[in-house]
Amino acid sequence: MVTIKSQKEIEKMKEACRITALVYDEIEKYIKPGITTMDLDNFAEKIIREHGGIPAQKGYPSGEKGVPAFPGTLCISINDEIIHGIPSKRTIIKDGDVVSVDLVVYKNGFHGDAARTYIVGKTSPEKQRLVDITKQAFFEGIKYAVKGNRIGDISHAIGEFVEKNGYNVVREFQGHGIGEEMHEDPGIPNYGKAGRGIRLEPGMTLAIEPMVMVGKPNICVLDDGWTIVTEDGSLAAHYENTILITEKEPEVLTLLKK
């Protein structure tokens, strides 16, 4: 069931989203070659807790028998890892790595969810283009995130933009509603036909998240039960924000207002 948030609930949710955005602002300054993914995870958790938030992904159940709950504050996925990479003291971020970071903050009973992809140190035109297209796919999608449109309008816009630029979207994972729960209805695929799905209404809060691969659209899960990688070893990127459907343009809640 899709939940429409009241103005009071939206204000609470904006605080969780503000902290989420703030963490990314600090990560951008902190991330560099030579640190471990656990260093990055600890850094983010400290900021969240200093602002009265809770790292919502830490302890999140896998839903799979024999797979433990997620142990980190951040999902940190490097190069061919798409999503759900587990922070580790043994994983050192290297010069030129493409690092996707996914974060969910819980505060005042509500969640804020966002993801960013960073090219650490030396970049290349190929890597930069992937990251840029993935980010732009989000903004292409939310052009259609307006009252009266349908979920499929967002999905179609994202998928069409990604594919016309020569990449593929992940089809097995998708965006979602968000609020008191981390994952709420509706599901929001990154592909599909326009004009399908539920109609958008003011007060809906959605996490829109293009996950994009350079190579073929096939994925697999590593032995840890969490980390999703491209089957062919090609690079991947991830960009996400929590948005609010309004009477006019959508409001992006997990970007700091300059």
Image (cartoon, grey):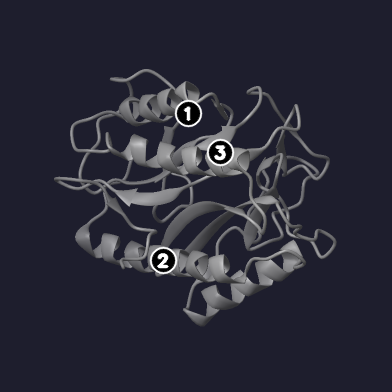
Q: Residues within 10 Å of mark 1 (few under 14, many from 20)?
A: many
Q: Secondary structure at mark 2?
A: helix
For badge 3, the amino acid type reads: Leu
For badge 1, the amino acid type reads: Val
In space, the residues marked 3 and 2 are separated at their CA atoms by: 29 Å
Q: Any mark on residue 130, and which? A: 3
Q: Is residue 184 above or below residue 190?
A: below
Q: Is residue 108 left or right of residue 245?
A: right
From the top left corner, tell me how far across and down residue 231 is, in percent.
Answer: 74, 28
Frontmost of labels 1 and 3 is: 3
Q: Any mark on residue 230, and which? A: none
User: Which residue is situated farthest in the bottom direction here?
Assistant: 50
Q: Secondary structure at mark 3?
A: helix
Q: Quadrant of the N terminus?
A: top left
Frontmost of labels 1 and 2 is: 1
Q: Is residue 45 left or right of residue 25?
A: right
Viewer-side residue, 127 vs 109: 127
Viewer-side residue, 66 vs 229: 229
Q: To which residue does mark 2 refer?
A: 16
Q: Is residue 17 above or below residue 149?
A: below
From the top left corner, tell me how far across and down residue 222 is, in percent.
Answer: 79, 39
Residue 109 visible: no
In space, the residues marked 1 and 3 are separated at their CA atoms by: 10 Å
User: Which residue is rendered at x = 80% and y = 61% of the image?
Assistant: 92
Which of the 4 quarters of the picture holds residue 144? top left
Q: To which residue does mark 1 refer?
A: 162
User: Which residue is rendered at x = 71% and y = 32% of the image?
Assistant: 234
From the top left corner, tell me how far across and down residue 91 is, in percent.
Answer: 81, 58
For badge 2, the amino acid type reads: Ala
